[in-house]
Image (cartoon, rainbow, N blue to C red):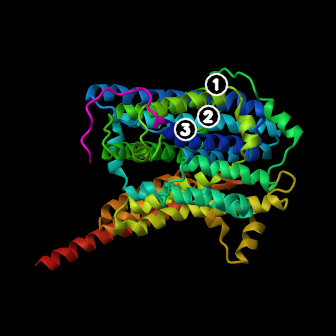
């Protein structure tokens, strides 16, 4: 590593432009995803998206980017260096998908099944998202003081494979299907992303920017997107100035979500926390050492600001600091990103961008993010723990399969308020094709927490630390007993978590027996080892 220069840092250098495009394209794609998922999946009205959610997104992005820019500048002054690169910061992609599909969508479907209108159900889903985001922020903030200790509790394979399961299914596969549904539009931008970030090909433009430009051009040339005066008028309607507001009352109205979806919120907060710690390590390996507690606290504060100001989506320190550093970005790319994202979100301009830039134009970047997260779950863990990573991926795959199965049934009119699910008939019909769908529904509940537990148990089995495997199994038994994992209940339109004392008795008993087996294995292993030493 080259000797750091002794100089005065600058608030902006020319290479910050390259770094800005890389980070801004990533952030814009995340925001386009928020708009697309909120409109398409959750059926939120424009006022809810542009008047409440995006102003909260704006404040969270401004706060974090300005802080990490200031931190890099001040640290550069103290160390007399002008080569410090600010920590990249933005919306947490995995949390975005997890909260939309595992929290907000179930709340909306349940509300509609109880007789609420679509706007009323959307309001309740938004409030649930705020609570989930608030819970994540509180965990991140608390982790500023206990973060390093938390990393010692769960093996890295358990943490990363759980993220990998969500990334593989809810992020990567979903966009892979969309890519091959529109291959002329999707494959070339994906090729640019793979060549840029995996093949190290320099196209003369940031790979993300070039990919999006090609995606936009191909979308319009192929007719995937066509000029529509009515849709354009609808896109420019949100233009204006939006002043962020506090939505504490909305959070209070759905406080029960925190306990009902605790099995989703807790792991997501912990993953965000551990991921930020790992990204701080990555920055230090690249030569930029930042203080842990203030960085994690700022990350948590950004998410809390998002929640109380209307956004359902946590923020995080991004992966890829060494990439931005190698690009030559320093301090300016970060604060410039916060400024531009703030203007876009607070002015309603995203409506126009959404019209001209379809999700298909930027999905290659998100697909790449999913690939990187899954690959990291293997490459950043010991080689011997690879089986544990595979085990950690499985619950996420099962949860995605359960979602696809329920969406398929709704597509043919089953699982709607007019024609509700008939559990006995449904389960029996699935078994005719040797598909035990109730197992998928059981794996779906508390999927993130469950994946971490199963992967951790596998790690300790591989390491022959059977006593620790038993402790994790006992923890799973407790969580299953109270319904935080596995236990589910049928509603007319969905399967939902079934919290309550003893609701998961069968699974709790099973995990308890598993713990007994591990303790016996620990005794047996100790005895055999003792005999070999004699």
Residue wearing tag 1:
247
Residue wearing tag 2:
130
Q: Residue at x 35, y 67 (%)?
A: 383
Front residue of 62/158: it is 62
**Which quadrant of the structure image shows residue 386?**
bottom left
Whole-percent x and y of residue 5? 27, 35
Q: Main secondary structure of the magenta part?
A: loop
**Which quadrant of the structure image shows residue 111?**
top right
> Which residues fall within the magenta stretch?
1-16
Q: Residue at x 61, y 33 (%)?
A: 255
Whole-percent x and y of residue 128? 64, 37
Dot 1 or dot 3: first in sequence order is 1
**Which label lies toward us, 2 or 3?**
3
Q: Secondary structure at mark 2?
A: helix
Side of 438 relative to 390 (left or right): right
Residue wearing tag 3:
314
Between the residue at mark 1 and the residue at mark 3, the CA separation in whole angstroms equals 16 Å
Q: Is residue 104 magenta?
A: no
Q: Secondary structure at mark 3?
A: loop
| Residues tagged 2 and 1 counted as in contact (Cβ below 8 A) | yes
Between the residue at mark 2 and the residue at mark 3, the CA separation in whole angstroms equals 10 Å
Quadrant in the picture for the C terminus = bottom left
Whole-percent x and y of residue 385? 37, 66
Between the residue at mark 2 and the residue at mark 1, the CA separation in whole angstroms equals 9 Å
């Amino acid at each position: 590593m080259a000797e750091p220069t002794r100089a005065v840092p600058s608030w902006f250098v020319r290479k910050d432009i390259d770094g800005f495009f890389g980070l801004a394209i990533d952030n814009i794609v995340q925001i386009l995803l928020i708009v697309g998922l909120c409109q398409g999946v959750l059926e939120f009205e424009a006022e809810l998206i542009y008047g409440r959610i995006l102003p909260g997104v704006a404040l969270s992005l401004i706060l974090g980017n300005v802080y990490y820019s200031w931190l890099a500048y001040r640290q550069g002054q103290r160390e007399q260096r002008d080569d410090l690169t600010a920590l990249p910061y933005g919306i947490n992609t995995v949390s975005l998908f997890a909260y939309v599909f595992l929290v907000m969508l179930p709340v909306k479907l349940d509300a509609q099944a109880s007789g609420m209108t679509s706007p009323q159900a959307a309001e309740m889903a938004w409030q649930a998202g705020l609570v989930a985001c608030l819970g994540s922020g509180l965990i991140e903030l608390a982790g500023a003081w206990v973060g390093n200790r938390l990393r010692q509790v769960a093996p890295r394979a358990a943490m990363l494979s759980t993220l990998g399961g969500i990334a593989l299914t809810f992020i990567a596969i979903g966009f892979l299907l969309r890519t091959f549904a529109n291959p002329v539009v999707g494959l070339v931008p994906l090729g640019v992303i793979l060549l840029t970030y995996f093949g190290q090909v320099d196209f003369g433009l940031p790979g993300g920017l070039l990919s999006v430009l090609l995606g936009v051009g191909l979308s319009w040339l192929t007719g995937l997107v066509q000029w529509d005066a009515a849709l354009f008028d609808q896109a420019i309607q949100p233009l204006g100035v939006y002043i962020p507001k506090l939505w504490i009352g909305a959070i209070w109205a759905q406080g029960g979500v925190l306990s009902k979806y605790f099995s989703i919120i807790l792991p997501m907060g912990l993953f965000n926390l551990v991921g930020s710690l790992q990204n701080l390590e990555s920055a230090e390996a690249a030569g930029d050492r930042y203080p842990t507690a203030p960085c994690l606290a700022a990350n948590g504060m950004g998410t809390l600001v998002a929640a109380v100001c209307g956004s359902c989506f946590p923020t995080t320190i991004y992966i890829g600091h060494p990439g931005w550093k190698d690009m030559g970005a320093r301090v300016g790319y970060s604060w410039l990103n916060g400024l531009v994202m703030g203007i876009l979100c607070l002015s309603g301009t995203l409506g126009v961008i959404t019209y001209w830039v379809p999700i298909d134009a930027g999905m290659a970047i998100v697909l790449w993010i999913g690939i990187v997260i899954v690959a990291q779950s293997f490459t950043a863990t010991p080689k011997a723990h690879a089986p544990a990573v595979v085990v950690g991926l499985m619950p996420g795959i099962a949860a995605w399969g359960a979602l696809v199965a329920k969406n398929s049934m709704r597509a043919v009119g089953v699982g709607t308020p007019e024609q509700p699910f008939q559990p006995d008939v449904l389960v029996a019909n699935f078994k005719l094709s040797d598909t035990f769908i109730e197992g998928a529904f059981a794996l779906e509940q508390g999927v993130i927490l469950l994946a971490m537990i199963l992967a951790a148990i596998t790690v300790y089995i591989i390491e022959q630390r059977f006593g620790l495997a038993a402790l994790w199994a006992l923890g799973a038994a407790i969580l299953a007993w109270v319904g935080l994992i596995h236990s589910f209940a049928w509603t007319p339109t969905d399967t939902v978590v079934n919290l309550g004392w003893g609701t998961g008795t069968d699974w709790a008993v099973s995990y308890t027996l598993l713990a007994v087996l591990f303790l016996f294995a620990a005794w047996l292993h100790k005895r055999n080892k003792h005999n070999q030493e004699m």
